[in-house]
Amino acid sequence: MKKKIIFGLYIFFLLYFLIFSEIYGRSGVMQDYHYNITPFQEIERFWKYREQLGLMSYINLFGNVLIFAPFGFIEPLASKKRSFWATLVDGCLLSLSVEIFQFITKVGRFDVDDLLLNTSGVAIGYICFLIWNAIRRKYGTKG
């Protein structure tokens, strides 16, 4: 039960950060629809101009990965019989839902690269879950 509450709190935080902080903080509502459907276009741009963009470049690239890593770790904890693929698909669908919401409401832009980076974060989180679970089982601790 505690794991489900933690998962629910994480989802709430994630949605608040990705949707509502966009509305009330970072850029507000845009007048036009903005989107990128070319894979790796924005990743390449942020990497290519990382010296000019500075910290913002790293925050965009690694932040999108890191913010979804807990999903890959917590979802298998909160539900039984969660495979890597099920967790990856769920994380990808959540990211896609956020991207579509941002596009429709014009509070952000739909970016396929964010989808790729977010899903990579889910995979990394799941790998961390596997390592943690193996250690937990080896040493017999309750989780």
Image (cartoon, grey):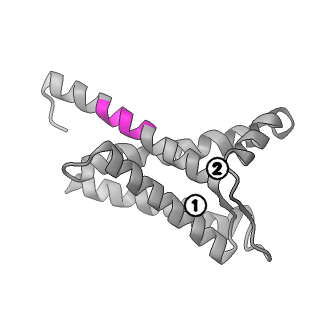
Circle 1 sits on which residue? 18
Measuring from the top left, give residue 67's x and y in whole percent: 52, 47
Front position among marks 1 and 2: 2
Residue occupying the point 31% across, 28% down: 131
Q: Answer whether residue 13 is visible to the viewer in this image.
A: no
Q: Which residues are magenta?
A: 124-130
Question: Split into 4 quadrants, where in the image is the N terminus?
Answer: bottom left
Viewer-proximal residue among 58 and 91: 91
Identified by mark 2, the residue type is: Asp
> For the residue labelled by badge 2, is the local secondary structure a helix, a strand or a loop?
helix
Viewer-proximal residue among 67 and 48: 48
Residue occupying the point 42% across, 60% down: 11
Measuring from the top left, give residue 80's x and y in whole percent: 19, 51
Query: Tag 1: Cα neighbours inside 10 Å, few (<14), some, or many (≥20)?
Result: some
Query: Tag 2: Cα neighbours inside 10 Å, few (<14), some, or many (≥20)?
Result: many
Measuring from the top left, give residue 90's x and y in whole percent: 39, 56
Q: Answer whether residue 105 is visible to the viewer in this image.
A: yes
Circle 2 sits on which residue? 113
Residue occupying the point 45% across, 60% down: 93
The CA span between labels 1 and 2 is: 15 Å
Which residue is most to the top?
139
Which residue is most to the left?
140
> For the residue labelled by badge 1, is the local secondary structure a helix, a strand or a loop?
helix
Residue occupying the point 48% across, 48% down: 68
Q: Quadrant of residue 19?
A: bottom right
**Residue 123 within the magenta-colored segment of the rendering:** no
Identified by mark 1, the residue type is: Leu
Question: Split into 4 quadrants, where in the image is the C terminus?
Answer: top left
Which residue is most to the front?
38
Sequence-wise, the earlier of marks 1 and 2 is 1
**Residue 125 within the magenta-colored segment of the rendering:** yes
Q: Quadrant of residue 102?
A: bottom right
